[in-house]
Image (cartoon, rainbow, N blue to C red):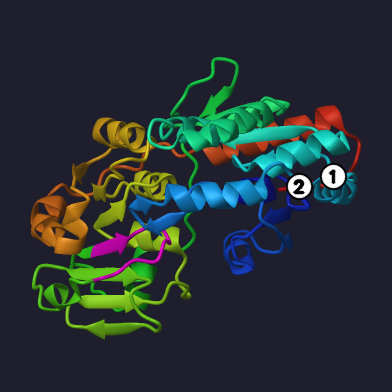
Amino acid sequence: MQSLRRLRPDSELRVYTETPAWFFRDSVGAVDYRPLRTDIGLVQRSPMLEDIPATLEQLAAFLPFRPALVNELARQIADQDLVVCDISPLGLVVAAAAGVPSVLLENFTWDWIYRAYLGAHPRLAPYVDAMATINSRADVHVQTEPVCRPDPAAMTVAPIARQLREPRSAVRDRLGVEPDVPLVLVSMGGVPAQYPFLARLRDRQDCVCLLPGAATERRREGALLALPARSDFYHPDLVNACDALVCKAGYSTLAEARQAGVPLAWFPREHFPESPVLDAFIEREMPGIRLQPSDWDEGAWIDRLPPLLALGRRPPGDTSGADQVARLLLQQIVGGSSNPAGPAG
């Protein structure tokens, strides 16, 4: 969406999602925001542990889609040029009902994810089939590196990350961190987490540890710098301002670290099928240290900070996927519609 706005400033972006409206305002600017559950995905117990029984319960209430809902949404989007779905299935069904072209954008799809849990949870089988059928309705299929299940018929693009805004030095100055002091950002991808190790961070002499989401307001206690989950700091700029990143291995965090050239110590999710793909990409393309999931609660990752910082920053990696996708979407609009409005989200 940022790239679309840069390439075509008059793009009108309508977003159907449960992600908070402020996220889009802070990242993109003005959008036509409409709160709606478009996806279940996996219910999380914690940043690294999924809850399959709760996921099944929510899927049963979500699928099949109510015809009245599909028809109403199809009416709403009938004036749009394009529907772009970041693996959320509802948009593809609505686009087909409205006769509006659709784009599926993914590095994995939920049928692929659910299939990995079928042995222990066979009740997922109908949802695997339903999601696969829905995904096949997309008019255009785009896969972003690192891709979990390559489709030879899909267009493959580089990783996608939100663009940097503020210079590294300016962000550190606003944080109150001296230029020569190593800064470590600890991020669990926006999923609420427990922080049982904070006392061990306060007395460190070799770095400052920055933890978004670890406080309700900004506070500094020794080497510990805690921020609320939403602050006046734009997260990609925080990644770029740091000298190392400790994180859950998630797509957006990986892409933002690659964009900044920052070494990362990452926690894989033991049972999540995307994890081996992300692990392999990091090990091949990025400086980093693989941690164990148990290292989080025990705070054992803290002992790995010196070798992590010793890896040093690298030149930025390729994260041009956003521009590649934006150009593709604009080509679809020009080639498929005379409507002057921009693409729907």
Residue type, label 2: Ala
Dot 2 or dot 1, earlier in sequence: 1
The answer to whether residue 109 is visible is no
Distance, label 2 to label 1, CA atoms, is 6 Å
The quadrant holding residue 191 is: bottom left
Q: Is residue 140 magenta?
A: no
Residue type, label 1: Gln
**Residue 55 appears at what percent x and percent y?**
50, 49
The quadrant holding residue 302 is: bottom left
Regarding mark 2 in the picture, which secondary structure is present there? Answer: loop
Residue occupying image coordinates x 15% and y 78%? 199
Q: Is residue 254 above or below residue 170?
A: above
Regarding mark 1 in the picture, which secondary structure is present there? Answer: loop
Q: Are marks 2 and 1 in contact (CB under 8 Å)?
A: yes
Q: Is residue 260 above or below residue 221?
A: above
Q: Which residue is mark 2?
A: 344
* Left or right: residue 310 compared with residue 162: left
**Residue 232 appears at what percent x and percent y?**
48, 75
Mark 1: few/some/many CA within 10 Å (<14, 14-19, 20+): many
Q: Which mark is residue 243?
A: none
Name the one closer to the observer, 269 or 163.
269
Q: Which residues are magenta?
A: 184-195
Q: Which residue is mark 1?
A: 80
